[in-house]
Image (cartoon, helix red, strand yellow):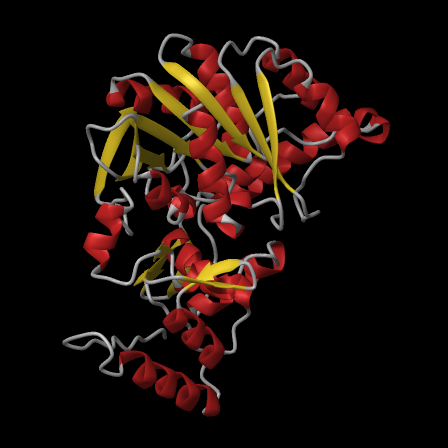
């Protein structure tokens, strides 16, 4: 079971960090896994070319963490050493962490769960997550963008806290995003990662008058179907039907005794993501019942979106009227990026294209490098 200790004090320089570091050392000496956090830090100095807060660095050292984990310890870093709300005001920033609003939007009889950060009157950004993920995959990027925008993230049908459905066709997902856009009721920008990256392009094509700009974060589809796969089309379709039949006999996941077991499973699939981030992410991807922990996502999702071919992708790209920012990470990962020999020709069909690479990130660009991603997106959206 996860437990926390909240260290507070009546003023600065009264020993909060010293006490927290002592606790971290003591717990590690007993073999306990620790995860420090200083959510908002005011006062940043340059350390090896990177801005950091001294207290945040002390907490990282006490926990045995690497410098690369700084964003997990302190997601909101302010330059001036003063009261955080004043420092944030002087930088023109709004401090928001967890979503400040939640709602459900009905789409074709399915309730789609949405979360929001930022001023509800600001220009809206609608964010769509990847396969098996959920809205809080934007939980660090969202607050960073919410300093300027109203950021809305949805749980796709069958994911997170949205309803499960009878159909998970690609078109049904697009109609859900269109329904959320109608609920927002204003011109907006779309941001999508992985599966969501492909979906926001198709949504923008469907809503040419409402969608202004589109950001696709490493969501450019799988490689082309191989000749061997083509030859086994009938066999693959038979397997698809048999898998659906098997899942229908067991309509839910088997339970796990501990949340940590789910975290380890996800870690094996995404080794670049930190254990601390995965604990937060998996907690919101799972639910606890009397018999243990289960994934929230519908097992039927694993059967795919129905008839579809990767070579259809570039034909859709040619129909996109809005500007597209195509973002990839510099590091090869489990699920990307695609080889340039495949990606380049696909993106060449986009009429108004900007490409960008975030250094030090794999497939989950916005989770691994949220600050760099937020800066990139803000600059492009406001250009």
Quick check: can you spot residue 95? no
**In the visual, does 32 lie left or right of 16?**
right
Quick check: can you spot residue 357? yes
268 or 47: which is nearer to us? 47
* Residue 316 percent coordinates (x, y): 59, 13
**In the visual, does 137 lie left or right of 152?**
right
Quarter of the figure that contains the C terminus? top left
Identify the residue at image location x=31%, y=66%.
290
**In the visual, does 221 lie left or right of 77?**
right
- Image quadrant in which you'd find residue 352: top right
Question: Can you say whether 43 is above or below 160 in the image?
Answer: below
Quarter of the figure that contains the N terminus? bottom left
- Image quadrant in which you'd find residue 145: top left
Identify the residue at image location x=55%, y=62%.
68
* Residue 245 percent coordinates (x, y): 56, 38
Identify the residue at image location x=55%, y=44%.
365
* Residue 8 percent coordinates (x, y): 21, 76
217 or 149: which is nearer to us? 149
């Amino acid at each position: 079971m996860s437990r926390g200790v909240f260290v507070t004090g009546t003023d600065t320089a009264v020993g909060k960090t010293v006490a927290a570091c002592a606790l971290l050392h003591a717990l590690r000496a007993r073999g306990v896994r620790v995860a420090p956090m200083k959510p908002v830090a005011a006062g940043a100095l340059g350390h090896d070319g990177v801005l950091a807060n001294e207290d945040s660095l002390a907490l990282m050292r006490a926990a045995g963490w690497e410098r690369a984990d700084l964003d997990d310890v302190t997601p909101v870093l302010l330059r001036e050493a003063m009261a955080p709300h004043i420092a944030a005001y002087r930088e023109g920033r709004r401090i928001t962490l967890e979503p400040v609003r939640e709602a459900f939007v009905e789409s074709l009889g399915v309730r789609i769960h949405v979360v929001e950060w930022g001023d509800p009157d600001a220009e809206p950004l609608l964010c769509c997550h990847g396969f098996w993920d959920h809205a809080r995959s934007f939980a660090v990027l969202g607050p960073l963008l919410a300093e300027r925008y109203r950021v809305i993230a949805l749980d796709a049908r069958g994911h997170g806290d949205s309803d499960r459905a009878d159909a998970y066709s690609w078109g049904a997902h697009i109609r859900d995003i269109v329904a959320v856009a109608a609920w927002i009721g204003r011109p907006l920008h779309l941001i999508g990662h992985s599966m969501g990256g492909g979906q926001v392009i198709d949504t923008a094509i469907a809503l040419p008058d409402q969608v202004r700009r589109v950001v696709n974060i490493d969501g450019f589809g799988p490689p082309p179907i191989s000749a061997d796969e083509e030859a086994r089309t009938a066999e693959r379709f038979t397997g698809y039907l048999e898998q659906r039949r098997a899942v229908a006999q067991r309509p839910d996941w088997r339970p796990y005794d501990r949340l940590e077991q789910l975290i380890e499973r996800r870690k094996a699939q995404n080794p670049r993501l930190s254990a601390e981030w995965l604990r937060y992410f998996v907690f919101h991807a799972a639910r606890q019942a009397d018999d243990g922990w289960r994934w929230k996502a519908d097992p039927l999702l694993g059967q795919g979106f129905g008839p579809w071919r990767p070579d259809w992708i570039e034909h859709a790209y040619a129909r996109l009227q809005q500007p597209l920012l195509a973002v990839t990470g510099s590091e090869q990962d489990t699920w990307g990026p695609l080889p340039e020999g495949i990606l380049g020709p696909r993106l060449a069909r986009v009429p108004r294209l900007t490409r960008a690479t975030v250094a030090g990130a794999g497939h989950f660009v916005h989770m691994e490098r949220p600050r760099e991603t937020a800066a990139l997106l803000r600059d492009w959206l406001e250009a």
